[in-house]
Structures are given as structure tokens and as C-alpha cells.
């Protein structure tokens, strides 16, 4: 440790600390413009100059390392004069248009001039003017380049954190201007992080422009609803109307950064597609009714179907308290374990449970990224969890974390990775098995209970590394983190993939790597949904339904018996519907008609249920099939908690009132329970949180007041390990047809974000992504309208040629309802074989590789 004295205050700092960091620890205010905590120092603005004893000239505190015995002064007359002069120079060309500038009231230049600036400027020349009008760089970002103070924050944030490299500078000196390529940001992520870090009104949010002043806003700290990263948001409303989103450096996992969905995608709360009042089906049509009428009708219908099975499906975007109460309702009032929380894939609890209990690391993402190696398995992190990608890029570039990628789809993070293994969809299990075998062979160990000899090595994709290189990199690492995309659960091979992940983590532990594992969920509260027990085979706390002790404890506290047999997941519930055995199917906040990977089957199944109840904020496709529709509060209209990918539980706060006749989700669950002449206790959000903290082991000891600005971490609760799992799966053979896969795209996540008018202005049109090799072979060009056809159906969308995309794959994002992508898919079959042809043309193929084109 080093001793440093600043303004006659002494403290100890670690070697490598800067003078600015030391001053901040002492609470001494040193002004800065170009400095950002998450970026390397630039020292260009010269606002943070300080005097150092024994050094002739003033030194930039942001870029000066502290040394033992250093004596620093931050407020001498020379420093004050220098700061005043620097500000006078900035004001020489800065337009004095504060009354109309969107940054007015929260402008760092305003604050600096008030605190340190001259009372009167010495400059009398005309101000430099780049443009007489503001420049619309994109649908969401507008620029007044005349206000720019050349701090370079926006350029560096875009390149070094986001990785988009969409902004740059032209000219030099006082004529330096920030701009996009040819005055446009058409190629950028539209994330708005440049707007967030701009200290003045040079870069502004177009959707927020001229709508409000900072002092008009009521600001509410909450959590983003769009993915499982769990970013901190501060939502600004004016007279109850949504205005904007910003974020804070010192709170949450995201450190001020947000993706396009988080910053610009919250206007969905004001969507015109809200359900206004309860509805019941009469003569084949949904008819609005009062809550009392809906209750009377639903009571009769529930009684009529009481002798049949019941089932429930709840969205992993709902708060923990709603999910907990929903599974309690199904288990104690409807007396069934037929409950699930995903409409896209099944979670095999027999392999998932031991994996979560043995290896899941409920610790800050910053800490697990700090491990020597980070292996990302499956999915596309750039589009599924953008802010997690920012943090991983920071780890790779500044902390020298070794990034290792194993996936079917490429991502922008591949450019920062040491090893990239491209595998066919469904081939992750075989590749992981090969990595395990490589680790065992390299370590010269034989692991009991494992059969890893003579494993076929999967062929690496073109331009990618092989599993052997991945095994070597893992062996060299001192500590390892494995981040797992839930896209892996789409495949019929999901169980085998989870088994091989378990194997890999066991081997890494035996090799002393101290492995940590976290999922990359693409739904805001998927971790919470699992923890709350919204699973057919797992109770709250991820304890098996067959666990007599766990079941007895819950039954005693709930005052009702819990069925002892595992229930049906969504797949099995739909089978019950088709077989005429499903009485009441209760769906809350989710849309399986759009999401389930077989539209024909799910349509038939939902239509065959005796009673379909849908509780939602929006009139979804599934709600359109319901017999009873109950209008629920949406995001921002009720308080609760989310549990993110890290296992961090955070407050989701209410910032507007429910609209029309919508009621809170908890109130509706109570309403339904009362129709069965039962009551759920407790029933308020705070009381339910307290019960969760008492009965769910990972949450024990938590209090609502104790969550604070950063939330609190749930505890890892070890379970009995399944031990080493045997036999790797066979290596999948290369298909001689194009194979369709899906997932999230950058601008949309699920189907909620499509109700955002702002996101729809920046999002790509529905598209089909393919490799350059495949499109060339088919005679297709970027931008063509193409037809994608499977044995189930077809769709038409615009072709997007991706030169990094692997040969043989076709990607269509799942986020566009109008495409009806699930019409092409068949349950249990993923990826799906398809043909692709240009719209308005026919394509004949007589054998693989030989293509004839006709009209």
C-alpha cells in the first residue's frame, strides 16, 4: 500500500491507483470532462490538473499514478486560475442556448462554470459554427455538433465498451467534430450510451427531445424488463406519462450502460394494445364485461371442469411475488403440479437441478468475469444479453480475461475471443464431451464413472478452432467461468448438453480451476421463476416435488396439501388438451400461440382445452383464443422483485398507475382463488416477499428494506451432485439441407418489445440471415425478398447476408409476430430443415449441391 496526502488528508491506496481515484476516496471534488470510470484515462480536457509537490508543472490527476509519500494540492490559486481559463476556452465557441437545450438543468458544463468558471468571458470573436441546424444521426439520436466540447467520451464509449465503432472524429484542434460515417449512425446499435455519457447537449435522445425538463420529472429507480442481465434503470415520468430512461454509474450490474431495448424500449408500457376490461366469449366472440360478471361466469365454468386436470403457465417476466403466488394457487387451490414458466423449451429438471445446485455461482458478474478464462456456450450474446457483452469485452480488453466461445451463431464478441469453436446446432453436447476428453487426456487422469475414451472429435466449422484448442486454453487457465445460453434448451439434445456441462464443470473442479457457472437468460426473471418453483418437478427453492420434507414444510405453512407426483410441463399439458383431459388451462403474461415451436399443434391444443383463462396486460394472440380474459397490470404498474442471471434480487418499482380496468396480478390471483372458495395468505407483495425469505433457502434472511440500490445476492444452496455422467452423445452428422434456427435479435426481445413504437423505428425489418457461401450457391443477394419453406409452412422476409455466418444455417429471429415463425417448426424437431428461394421464383433441387433455377 502507498501513502498519499491530498489537501492535508492522508490515506493509503493500492499500487496503480491514480491521484484522482485517491481524491475521490477522500471526498475531494476534482472536476473532469474526458474522464469516465470504466475507460482508460485520456487526459485531454485538462480540468483535473493538480499540483504535486516536487513536480514543476500541473499534472492531470486522472492519468497520474500515486506514489508513496506523494503530496498533492487540488485547490491552489494557480489551479483555480487554470480551471477558469480552460472553461473560458470551452465557452468561447459553445453556443449559449441553455434555455432550449435538452441538457439544461443536468449539464456538466453548466455545473462546472457555476463552480469554477469565469464570471465574464475574455473572448469577443464570433463563435465557430459547424452546422446551423441539428443533425438527425439516427431515428433516436440527434446531434448539435456546435455544443461539443471534444471530450471524446461518446467515441470511446462506442468503440471500447459497446464495440460498435459507429462514432468517430474528423478534423483536428478546435475544428474537431464528432460524427457517424457520412453523417449517419445507420450501422450502430442505437443503444444511446453516447447520449448518456455526453456531458453537454451535443448528443441528445430524439424521442425525449423538448418533452420535459429534468426538474419536471418524477424519477423512479427500477430494473429493466427485457433480459436477465438485470440492468438498473431510472425511469422519468411527467404527470404520470412515461418520458425517458437513464441509468446510473454507481448502481447495478450495468455501470450506466444500457442496450437499445433498455434505453428506448420502455414506451411499450403506453401501447395502444392494452386489454381494457375483462372479457368472456359469447357466440364465438370476446365480449367486454365487468369484473363481477367475469367472476360469476368464471365461477360456473371452473365448477363445470373441476373433475378434469388443470394446468398453469406463467411468464418469466413477472415479479417473484406473482410467480410464487401463482404456483401456490395451482398447487393448493387447483391441486396440481402441472405448471411451467417457458413456452419455448422444456427445462429437464433431473439434470438442471444438480447443475444449479452444484455449480451455479450467485455472485456479481464482475467477479466471475474476473476469472482467468470465461467460456461462453451457445447463443449470440451480442443480441441476447448486450450489456453482459459490454462487460465481457471490458474484461477481455482491460483485465486480460481469456474469452472462449462455443456456439452455432457468431457474435461480435468473437473478435475479442482467444478461441472460437463453431458447432452445428445440437452439436454442443458432443463438442463439450470432446473438450472434457481433451482435459482428461492432457491431465493424465482417469476419472471414475466416466467413459471418455475414443470420443469422435466434431469437425470445427469453417474459420473456427477445434475442441482441442478449447481444452488447451481451459487447462492453461487458473480459474474458469462458464456462461451458458438458454438457447441450448431449445434442442432435443438439451438434456445431453446439460449432462456434458456438468461433466466439464466436474473436471474443471478436479483440476483445481474453481469453476463458476451462470446462465445467460433472455427473460428478465427466468432465474426467479425457477427459484419460485414454477416448474412441474420442482418446488420453491428448486427442491424436487418428490422431496417429502420440503413438501411437508410448505404444506404446513400454506395450510394445504401439495400433490406428491411431478406435474406436466407445457408440452405434456398441451397433450392433455388434445386428449380432451384438460379442464382449466390458466395462462398469465405469456403468449404460447406465438412462442411455442409448433403453431399448428398449439393452436389445436388451446382450442381443445375446456376452459382457457388468459391474464395479461396486452391482447395477445393467445388471449384472442381465450374463453375468459382478465386485464392485468403491466410492467411499471406494480411493485415486486426480479432475480437476475447473477442471482441478484432487485426491486422492480411501480412508476405509473394501472390503466383502464386492469388490476394487479396478485389481486387477480386472489380473485381466482376466491372463485374456488379459498383464500391465499399472505396476499400483499411485502408479506409474500417475507414468506419467500422464510421458506425458500436461497432467499432466507433477505428483507425488502435490505435490498438497497444494488439489490442483494441470494445464496447458493448446494444439492447432492449427480456425479460424473456417462457416455458422450454421438457427433451429429452434417445435414445436406439448410437448417433453420432462431433466437433473439438486437432490437427486440421476445414479443413485448414489439409493442414499443420507438424500437420499431430503429429495428430491422423481419429478416433471414444466411452465409455468403449459401446465398451465392442459391443465386441470392443481400436485400432480396426470400421465401423460407419447411414441411410445416413458409414465410417471406428480407435476406441479410452475414459473412461470418456458418454454412448450412438459416437464422430467423423469433421476435416478429407477423412472421409466424413457429408455423415452420414442429415440436421436438430443432433445428428445422428448410428450403430458401427468392420470392416470385421457384427453386428445383435434384441433388445436394446442384441447383436449377426457373420461373
Image (tube, rainbow, N blue to C red):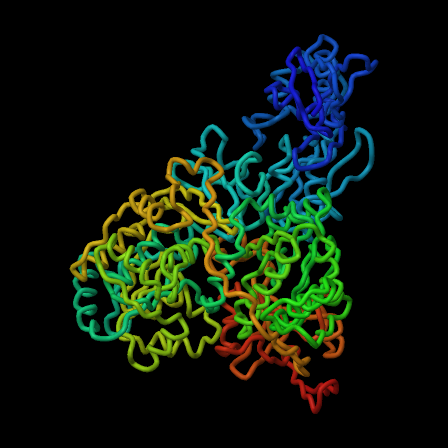
Quarter of the image that includes the N terminus:
top right
Residue 66 is at least partly visible in this image: yes
Quadrant in the picture for residue 725 = bottom right
Whether residue 595 is visible here, answered yes or no, is no
Q: Is residue 157 placed above or below 740 in the rendered structure?
A: above
**Front residue (pair 508, 218):** 508
Position of residue 790 relative to residue 628, above or below, is below
Q: Is residue 126 above or below residue 449?
A: above
Q: Is residue 497 shown above or below 272?
A: below
Q: Give the residue at x 35% y 58%.
A: 616
Q: Position of residue 594 (x, y in %)?
A: 45, 68
Q: Position of residue 615 (x, y in %)?
A: 32, 60
Residue at position x 39%, y 53% from top?
A: 318
Looking at the image, residue 384 sits to the left or right of residue 92; the answer is: left
Q: Residue 526: percent from the left, percent from the top?
A: 46, 56
Q: Residue at x 18, y 65 (%)?
A: 297
Say whether residue 5 is left or right of residue 634: right
Quadrant of the rendering where the C terminus is positioned: bottom right
Residue 686's spot in the image, x, y percent?
A: 31, 42
Residue reaching furthest top? 77
On the picture, is 405 further left or further right than 496? right
**Residue closest to the eye, 422 or 478:** 478
Residue closer to the observer: 569 or 42: 569
Amino acid at each position: 500500500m502507498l501513502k498519499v496526502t491530498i489537501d492535508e488528508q492522508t490515506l493509503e491506496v493500492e499500487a496503480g491507483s491514480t491521484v484522482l481515484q485517491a481524491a475521490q476516496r477522500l471526498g475531494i471534488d476534482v472536476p473532469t470532462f474526458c474522464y469516465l470510470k470504466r475507460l482508460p484515462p485520456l487526459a485531454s480536457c485538462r480540468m483535473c490538473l493538480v499540483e504535486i509537490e516536487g513536480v514543476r508543472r500541473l499534472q492531470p490527476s486522472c492519468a497520474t499514478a500515486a506514489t508513496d509519500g506523494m503530496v498533492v494540492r487540488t485547490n491552489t490559486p494557480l489551479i483555480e486560475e487554470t480551471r477558469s481559463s480552460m472553461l473560458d476556452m470551452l465557452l468561447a465557441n459553445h453556443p449559449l442556448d441553455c434555455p432550449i437545450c435538452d441538457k439544461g438543468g443536468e449539464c456538466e458544463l453548466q455545473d462546472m462554470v457555476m463552480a469554477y468558471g469565469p464570471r465574464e468571458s475574455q473572448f469577443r470573436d464570433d463563435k465557430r459554427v459547424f452546422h446551423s441546424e441539428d443533425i438527425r444521426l439516427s431515428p433516436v439520436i440527434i446531434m448539435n455538433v456546435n455544443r461539443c466540447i471534444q471530450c471524446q467520451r461518446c467515441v470511446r464509449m462506442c468503440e471500447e465498451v459497446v464495440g460498435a465503432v459507429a462514432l468517430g472524429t474528423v478534423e483536428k484542434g478546435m475544428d474537431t467534430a464528432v460524427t457517424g460515417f457520412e453523417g449517419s449512425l445507420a450501422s450502430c446499435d442505437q443503444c444511446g450510451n453516447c447520449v448518456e455519457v455526453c456531458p453537454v447537449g451535443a448528443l441528445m435522445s430524439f424521442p425525449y427531445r423538448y418533452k420535459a425538463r429534468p426538474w419536471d420529472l418524477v424519477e423512479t429507480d427500477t430494473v429493466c424488463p427485457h433480459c436477465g442481465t438485470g440492468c438498473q434503470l431510472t425511469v422519468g415520468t411527467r404527470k404520470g406519462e412515461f418520458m425517458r430512461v437513464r441509468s446510473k454509474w454507481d448502481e447495478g450490474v450495468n455501470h450506466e450502460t444500457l442496450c437499445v431495448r433498455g434505453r428506448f424500449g420502455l414506451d411499450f408500457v403506453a401501447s395502444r394494445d392494452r386489454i381494457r376490461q375483462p372479457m368472456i366469449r359469447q357466440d364465438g366472440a370476446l365480449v367486454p364485461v365487468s369484473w363481477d360478471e367475469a367472476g360469476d361466469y368464471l365461477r360456473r365454468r371452473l365448477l363445470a371442469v373441476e373433475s378434469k386436470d388443470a394446468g398453469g403457465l406463467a411468464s418469466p417476466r413477472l415479479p417473484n411475488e406473482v410467480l410464487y403466488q401463482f404456483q401456490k394457487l395451482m398447487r393448493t387451490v387447483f391441486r396440481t403440479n402441472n405448471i411451467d414458466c417457458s413456452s419455448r423449451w422444456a427445462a429437464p429438471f433431473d439434470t438442471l437441478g444438480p447443475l444449479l445446485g452444484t455449480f451455479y455461482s450467485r455472485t456479481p458478474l464482475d467477479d466471475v468475469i474476473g476469472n482467468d478464462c470465461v467460456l461462453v456456450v451457445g447463443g449470440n450474446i451480442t443480441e441476447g444479453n448486450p450489456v453482459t457483452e459490454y462487460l465481457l469485452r471490458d474484461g477481455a480488453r482491460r483485465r486480460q480475461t481469456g474469452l472462449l466461445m462455443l456456439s452455432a451463431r457468431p457474435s461480435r464478441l468473437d473478435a475479442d475471443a482467444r478461441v472460437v469453436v463453431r458447432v452445428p446446432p445440437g452439436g454442443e453436447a458432443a463438442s463439450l464431451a470432446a473438450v472434457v476428453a481433451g482435459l482428461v487426456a492432457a491431465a493424465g487422469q482417469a476419472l471414475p464413472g466416466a467413459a471418455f475414451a475414443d470420443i469422435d472429435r466434431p469437425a470445427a466449422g469453417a474459420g473456427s478452432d477445434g475442441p482441442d484448442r478449447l481444452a488447451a486454453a481451459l487447462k492453461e487457465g487458473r480459474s474458469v467461468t462458464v456462461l451458458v445460453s438458454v438457447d441450448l434448451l431449445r434442442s432435443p439434445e438439451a438434456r445431453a448438453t446439460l449432462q456434458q456441462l456438468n461433466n466439464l464443470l466436474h473436471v474443471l473442479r478436479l483440476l483445481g480451476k474453481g469453476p463458476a457457472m451462470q446462465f445467460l437468460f433472455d427473460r428478465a426473471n427466468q432465474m426467479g421463476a425457477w427459484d419460485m418453483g414454477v416448474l412441474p418437478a420442482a418446488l420453491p427453492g428448486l427442491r424436487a416435488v418428490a422431496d417429502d420434507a420440503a413438501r411437508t414444510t410448505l404444506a404446513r405453512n400454506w395450510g394445504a396439501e401439495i400433490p406428491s407426483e411431478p406435474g406436466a410441463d407445457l408440452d405434456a399439458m398441451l397433450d392433455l388438451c388434445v386428449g380432451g383431459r384438460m379442464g382449466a388451462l390458466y395462462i398469465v403474461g405469456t403468449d404460447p400461440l406465438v412462442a411455442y415451436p409448433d403453431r399448428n399443434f398449439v393452436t389445436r391444443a388451446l382450442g381443445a382445452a375446456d376452459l382457457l383463462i388468459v391474464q395479461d396486460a396486452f391482447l395477445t394472440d393467445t388471449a384472442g383464443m381465450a374463453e375468459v380474459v382478465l386485464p392485468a397490470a403491466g410492467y411499471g404498474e406494480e411493485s415486486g422483485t426480479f432475480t437476475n442471471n447473477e442471482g441478484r434480487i432487485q426491486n422492480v418499482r411501480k412508476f405509473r398507475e394501472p390503466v383502464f380496468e386492469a388490476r394487479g396480478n396478485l389481486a387477480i390471483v386472489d380473485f381466482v382463488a376466491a372463485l374456488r372458495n379459498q383464500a391465499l395468505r399472505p396476499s400483499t407483495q411485502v408479506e409474500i416477499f417475507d414468506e419467500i425469505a422464510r421458506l425458500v433457502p436461497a432467499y432466507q434472511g433477505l428483507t425488502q428494506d435490505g435490498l438497497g440500490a444494488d439489490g442483494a445476492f441470494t445464496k447458493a444452496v448446494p444439492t447432492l451432485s449427480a456425479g460424473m455422467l456417462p457416455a458422450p452423445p454421438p457427433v451429429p452428422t452434417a445435414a445436406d439441407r439448410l437448417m433453420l434456427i432462431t433466437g433473439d435479435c438486437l432490437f427486440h426481445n421476445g414479443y413485448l418489445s414489439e409493442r414499443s413504437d420507438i424500437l420499431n423505428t430503429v429495428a430491422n425489418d423481419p429478416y433471414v440471415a444466411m452465409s455468403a457461401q449459401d446465398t451465392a450457391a442459391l443465386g441470392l443477394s443481400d436485400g432480396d425478398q426470400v421465401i423460407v419453406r419447411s414441411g410445416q409452412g413458409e414465410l417471406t422476409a428480407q435476406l441479410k447476408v452475414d459473412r461470418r455466418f456458418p454454412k448450412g444455417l438459416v437464422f430467423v429471429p423469433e421476435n416478429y409476430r407477423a412472421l409466424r415463425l413457429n408455423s415452420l417448426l414442429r415440436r421436438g424437431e430443432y433445428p428445422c430443415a428448410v428450403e430458401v428461394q427468392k420470392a416470385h421464383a421457384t427453386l428445383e433441387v435434384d441433388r445436394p449441391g446442384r441447383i436449377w433455377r426457373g420461373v
